[in-house]
Amino acid sequence: MSNRNQAVINWISGPVLRAHTRDAFTVYEAVLVGVQALLGEVIRIEEDLVVVQVYEDTSGMRPGDVVVGTGMPLSVKLGPYILGHIFDGLLRPLHHATDKFIGPGMRSARPARFMFEPGVNLGQQLTPGASLGTVRQDGGHNQVCLLAPDVSGTVTSIKTGGTYLDNECIAVLEDAAGRPHEIHMNHWWSIRKPRPVSERQAATGPLFTGQRILDSLFPIANGGRAAMPGGFGTGKTILQETLAKWCDADVIIYVGCGERGNEMAGVLAELPTLEDPRTGRPLMERTVIIANTSNMPVAAREASIYTGVTVAEYFRDQGLRVALMADSTSRWAEALREVSGRLGELPSEAGYPAYLSSRLAEFYERAAQVRTLGGATGALSIIGAVSPPSADFSEPVTTHTKRYVRAFWALDATRAQARFYPAIHPLQSYSGDIEELVDFWRQHDHPHWLQQRRRFLTILEQQSHLERMARIVGKDALPPRQQHILLCADIINDAFLRQSAFSDNDRYCSPQRQSLMMQLIDRFIDLTLQVIDADIPMDAIYALPVLRRLRRMNEDIDDRHLEQLRALSQDLEAACAQLRQRSHADET
Ligand SMILES: Nc1ncnc2c1ncn2[C@@H]1O[C@H](COP(=O)(O)OP(=O)(O)OP(=O)(O)O)[C@@H](O)[C@H]1O
Ligand SMILES: [Mg+2]
């Protein structure tokens, strides 16, 4: 340890401390603090003082204790063990949701055995981030064994196929200067430094979620960024979980950030019991949970977001589609605020530090579809929950987040109180990933998706004006065309946008069903307009028995019975034709 940087503590406040030094520490260097060797990070250097934030409970620490540099930035160990496991904000394994945090001495998972199948030959020249072969644990998914993004060279030794510990040397590379490098299944990477890629690409399709209001109205692209702001109890956690279960990503990274322990416990108890709808295997096998509940040290919460994206990028670099859910980024911002306050930094809006905005940008900008260093196509989509105090969307975390996301799903308290779920408000939400998805819907027999989407949104907007008017004059006093808009808006809301996360029939909606339902409602709008144009009173439409079936189609007709949607469509055509004939007969 003698050649390591050292400093002596002279001031401590919660997770922040200052220490005197004559050594050359660097900013963001990871340090070990006190006799317990608690993990910390240098966040500022002022002449002979280093300011350190500590990621573990500092109770009992005192001036005079020593801070020792590690010579490395704060890093996590990335390797095959991660998939399917639960960690704290610094990627130390947790075995139970209620674990407060891992003992101070324990830095990462114990070595585990994996089957390694080499995919390279002796003498082969490997570039940074290349694949060395595949890794697998019994019953687990195949993973790619990646060379770290900062290592390259010629293979001078490689293990044959077999079972090895993940910290064992499986290959040796010789770099350009002739130096040997031992390669393991694991490698370390700084959590604050985005993993490099060959190229960021334009998105080529959606991150399909199975939630109609998202996929059909406010989609997120594969490699996109979305935020879901919502007041207390509006359904953020349920929506994040629903996406984790149903979105079509290969790997899910779930960052539970500063939420209550019991809520996190709910997620942890439920996720491992879930079946992967695509394979029938446990969903947890392709999930990583990073849990940092409100009872864990605050500074570790600040780090957990970066740990989450770093892990997500590691899987992206294996050529996978990765979705990262963070619940909630507001709690993360509060951690940032708390540490900044202890540092005595000048507060900006609502007490948050002035760098809140740039930190949010850095986080969301790590989402993208990319060509990896190894030449594969991978994608990382980020979906952050935001919990604005008093559901005030003009507060700093929401407003700054809005600048960096492409899809904005505003959860509305009034809708949630009416138990209308998901409580996403269609007039306050938006998506910038619309044009990119036209082809996707065309491939799912939905060539007019763009026009129908616009039509639905226009009707919902007209509804909000007309409802105000209807409250004053009464709905029956409105002209038939306006009553018609209100009826269509009701159908769009009840039959299409409403989707319970707890309904066996409806918690997931396939692209085929979404497109059939949307086209059915669009046809309903056209047909009933024709009826009104034939001067048939609205009451005749309200009385159509088929209307009730239409309204309930989301719950009643599941993905296995799409023919019933087609039958409903035929019945609707027939019922409206009959109305028109009757009126024609009345006239003659
Ligand atoms: N999509 C949904 N389908 C059915 N019910 C839902 C849905 N979303 C939310 N709910 C209901 O709303 C309740 C609150 O949801 P949730 O815990 O997700 O809110 P939250 O926004 O995360 O709250 P908090 O602000 O406390 O974190 C749930 O327990 C559930 O009963
Ligand atoms: Mg919640």
Image: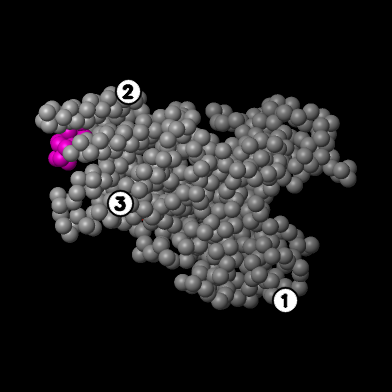
Q: Residue at x 23, y 54 (%)?
A: 467
Instruction: Looking at the picture, tell me which residue is in the foreground, 258 or 93.
Output: 258
Q: In this figure, which residue is indicated by the disc labeled 3?
A: 462
Q: In this figure, which residue is indicated by the disc labeled 1?
A: 47
Q: Residue at x 67, y 60 (%)?
A: 30
Give the answer, above or below, for where 170 lies relative to 337. Answer: above
Label ID, residue 563: 2
Q: Position of residue 390 (x, y in %)?
A: 35, 64
| Position of residue 488 in the picture relative to residue 261 (left or right) | left
| Picture quadrant where residue 576 is located | top left
Q: Tag count in the figure?
A: 3
| Position of residue 370 in the picture relative to residue 462 (left or right) | right
Q: Residue at x 36, y 58 (%)?
A: 231
Identify the magenta region.
536-548
Answer with mark 3 or mark 2, whichever residue precedes in sequence: 3
Instruction: Looking at the picture, tell me which residue is in the foreground, 471 or 270.
Output: 471
Q: Amino acid at mark 3?
A: Gln
How many other residues sit within 10 Å of disc 3, few (<14), some (14-19) or many (≥20)? some
Q: CA distance from mark 1 to mark 2?
A: 74 Å
Q: CA distance from mark 3 to mark 2?
A: 32 Å
Q: Amino acid at mark 2?
A: Glu
